[in-house]
């Protein structure tokens, strides 16, 4: 089986794919100081409880936007799984053209989202990823990555509001019944949810106009309709408040890593010596 590791700024997700479907998924908070042994003590126990031993993992791939986390995650794979993982970076075969000024600056998560969304749903499309930052990524009908936008995530906005205004409490993110709050807490929740949703809808509409115009200029035809794919942990929550999302796919980055791994089967490093000895014993 393939172990997929998606390391984001807030959480790291470990998931097992058996070649046809996902059979296990576990999440832990991102911590720059967490060691390979700590990952092992936590994950291997959960895997065993789900019926999967270390020997069931034949390959591993890591995608991360947190460079400091990569060393210990790679060390975990080598020491505990006896595998050298594949790393999602620009040296791999992605099968798509990246049409931006500095491709090396593009985060792996954004590229993975575009890859998975186009493979699963076609294009043109806009992927909205509700993470630590909320990203908007644009892929055309041919699968080319065209660029996008980055906005502060809603939790960052909430933290900034709480820290900058001494009398404002920290509140949880949820969908309020109304935009008119009757006290400080409900007013903050209304502003965070409906205000942030307005930001998302506004950017989707603006990007959609530019995407349709670009398509019209290149083809001589009127702009084709585009899909909007929402992903990330908060995607279902914000999907309740808008009609602009065509599809909500919370695990899109994992799908991108799985697709990238399958596309680069011949690039997986050979098993480490300890793995070979264990298999033959």
Image (cartoon, rainbow, N blue to C red):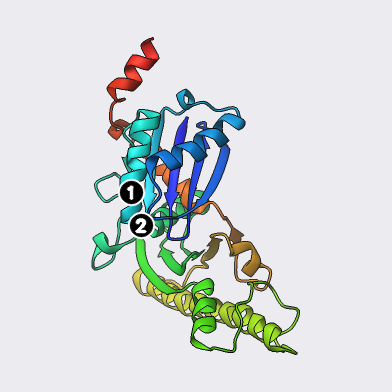
| Foreground residue among 265 and 88 | 88
Question: Where is residue 218 drawn, in percent x and y?
Answer: 34, 70
Question: Where is residue 29 drawn, in percent x and y?
Answer: 50, 54
| Foreground residue among 276 and 103 | 276
Q: Quadrant of residue 85?
A: top left
Q: Residue at x 50, y 32 (%)?
A: 19
Residue wearing tag 1 = 70
| Residues at discs 1 and 2 in contact (Cβ within 8 Å) | yes
**Disc 2, SS:** loop
Q: Residue at x 64, y 84 (%)?
A: 188
**Disc 1, SS:** helix
Q: Residues within 10 Å of mark 1 (few under 14, many from 20)?
A: some
Residue wearing tag 2 = 66
Lateral position of residue 67 relative to residue 257, left or right: left
Q: Quadrant of the C terminus?
A: top left
Residue 94 is at least partly visible in this image: no
């Amino acid at each position: 089986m393939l172990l997929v590791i998606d390391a984001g700024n807030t959480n790291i997700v470990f998931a097992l794919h058996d070649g046809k479907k996902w059979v296990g998924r576990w999440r832990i908070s991102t911590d720059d100081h967490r060691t390979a042994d700590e990952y092992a003590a936590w994950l291997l126990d959960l895997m065993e409880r789900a019926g999967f031993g270390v020997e069931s993992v034949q390959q591993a791939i890591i995608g991360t936007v947190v460079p400091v986390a990569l060393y210990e995650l790679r060390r975990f794979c080598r020491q505990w799984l006896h595998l050298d993982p594949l790393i999602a970076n620009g040296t791999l075969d992605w099968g798509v053209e990246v049409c931006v000024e500095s491709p090396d600056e593009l985060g792996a998560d954004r590229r993975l989202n575009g890859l998975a969304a186009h493979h699963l749903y076609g294009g043109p499309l806009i992927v909205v990823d509700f993470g630590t930052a909320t990203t908007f990524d644009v892929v055309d009908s041919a699968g080319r990555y065209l660029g996008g936008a980055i906005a502060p995530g809603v939790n960052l906005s909430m933290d900034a509001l709480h820290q900058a205004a001494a009398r404002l409490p920290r509140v949880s993110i949820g969908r309020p019944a109304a935009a008119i709050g009757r006290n400080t807490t409900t007013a903050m929740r209304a502003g965070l949810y409906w205000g942030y949703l307005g930001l998302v809808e506004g950017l989707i509409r603006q990007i959609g106009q530019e995407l349709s115009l670009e398509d019209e200029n290149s083809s001589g035809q009127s702009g084709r309709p585009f899909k909007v794919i929402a992903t990330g942990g908060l995607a279902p929550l914000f999907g309740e408040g808008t009609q602009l999302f065509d599809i909500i796919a919370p695990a899109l980055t994992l799908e991108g890593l799985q697709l990238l791994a399958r596309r680069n089967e011949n690039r997986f490093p050979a098993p480490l010596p300890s793995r070979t000895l264990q298999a033959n014993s």
